[in-house]
Image (cartoon, rainbow, N blue to C red):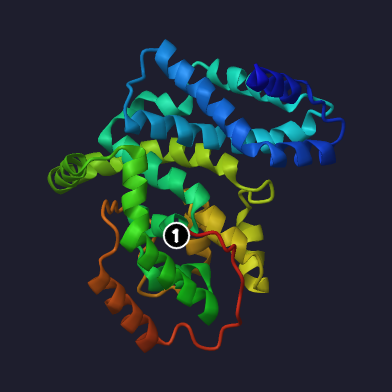
Amino acid sequence: MAERQVLSTKLSILATSVDEFDCLVAETLPDLLDRATDHLRRFLRETGQWADDISHEKLALRWGYELLERFLVWGRNEVPCRPYFLLDSFIARYLSQPEPFCYHKDLLTPLGRFLDGVTARAVLSRDALMALFYHLYGFGQGQVVRILDLGPTESQRVYKNFERWRRAGWQRAMIESGMTDSELLQIEDQKRRHSEQIIAEADRLLRAVQDHYRKSEPDHFRCLTRQQWAHMFQEGYGYDYRVWHLALCRECLVVTYDLRQDGLAGIPAPRIDLQFRPLSKGRIVSFIMKYREDGNGAGRPTQRLSRTSA
C-alpha cells in the first residue's frame, strides 16, 4: 500500500518549468530508468521477442538507457508536464513506429549486430568512439591523430583510449550486443572468403546505423559543408566536433580527408576495412614508434576533447 501511495505521488508531480523538470528527473532518474525498462520488457514479451535470460535483460536495460536519454532532451520542450506520464507517452509513441531500430531486420545478422554494437557503445564511451576509426576503416592511433589534427596532449589520450578499449571496452561491447566468439569467427571467415560482398553489405548497413546514432549527438554536432570543414581546420578549433562527428559520419570523414590529403601522406583514403577484433598490443607499439619517427606530433598546440571514456 505504501509503495502504491509513493508511486501515485510521483505520477502526479507537475513540472511547470524547465528548471523544475530538470530537478525532478535528476531526483527520480533511477525510477524513470526502471519504468522505461519495464515498458520494454513488456513490449518484448507481447511481441514474442523475450526470453528470461541475462542477454534479454541487458537488451531491455540498454534500450531503456537510450530512450531515457532521448526523453531527457525532448521532455524539456514539453513543460508543463507530468514527467512520469510523459515518459509513458514518449516510449509508447516510439514503440508504435513500424520498425523500431533495435529490431531492424538487417541488424539481426552477426554483421549487423557487430556494427550496431560498437556504434551504440561509441555514443556513451570515448574509448569506443576512437576505436570506431579502427573497426570501420582500419586506422590506427597515429593515423587517427593526424586525421583529426590533434596536439601532443590529446594524442596521448588517443593511445590510452585504444589501450582501454583493447583491455576491456571491446569485450564489454560484444557482451552487450550479444555477439559470441563463433559469430565473430563466422564474419571474419566471410571477410576472408567474400571480401567484396561483406564490404558492400557493411557499407549499406553503416549508413542506417550512423544515421540513427548521430541523433544522440549534441544539436551543434551536425554535418558541415566542405567550406565549413576547411575553415574549421584552418582556424584550429572544433576538436570535440571532429572526434564525435567524424567517427559517426563516413561522408564528412571522406570530405575532410579530401580537403587535407596533402598533409596526410601515407594514410589511405577512408574506405570500409572491417576489423572485428581490437587493435593488438604489438601493432599499438609499432604505430607509436612510427608516429614518433615521423615527428607528426611536434609543435602542435594542446587541445581539449570531451572526457567521456569507458
Residue 109 appears anywhere in the view: yes
Q: Is residue 72 above or below residue 240?
A: above
Q: Quadrant of residue 215?
A: top right
* Left or right: 26 as drawn, with respect to 16: left
Residue 279 point in image, percent of width and height:
29, 63
Q: What residue is rendered at 42% in x and 70% in y?
A: 160
Q: Quadrant of residue 80?
A: top right
- Tell me the quarter of the image containing the N terminus: top right
Residue 165 point in image, percent of width and height:
37, 60
Q: What residue is rendered at 40% in x and 55% in y?
A: 132
**179 and 225: which is toward the camera:** 179
**137 and 99: which is toward the camera:** 99
What number of labels is visible? 1
Q: Quadrant of residue 265?
A: bottom left
* Left or right: 125 as drawn, with respect to 135: right
Q: Circle 1 sits on which residue? A: 127
Q: Is residue 256 above or below residue 109?
A: below
Residue 138 appears anywhere in the view: no
Secondary structure state at the residue bearing disc 1 = helix
Residue 197 point in image, percent of width and height:
23, 39
Q: Amino acid at mark 1?
A: Asp
Q: Report crowding for label 1: few under 14, some 14 to 19, many 20 or more residues within 10 A (C-alpha).
A: many
Q: Residue furthest right?
A: 16
Residue 266 point in image, percent of width and height:
35, 74
* Left or right: 71 as drawn, with respect to 82: left
Q: Is residue 268 above or below residue 2?
A: below
Q: What residue is rendered at 87% in x and 30% in y?
A: 16
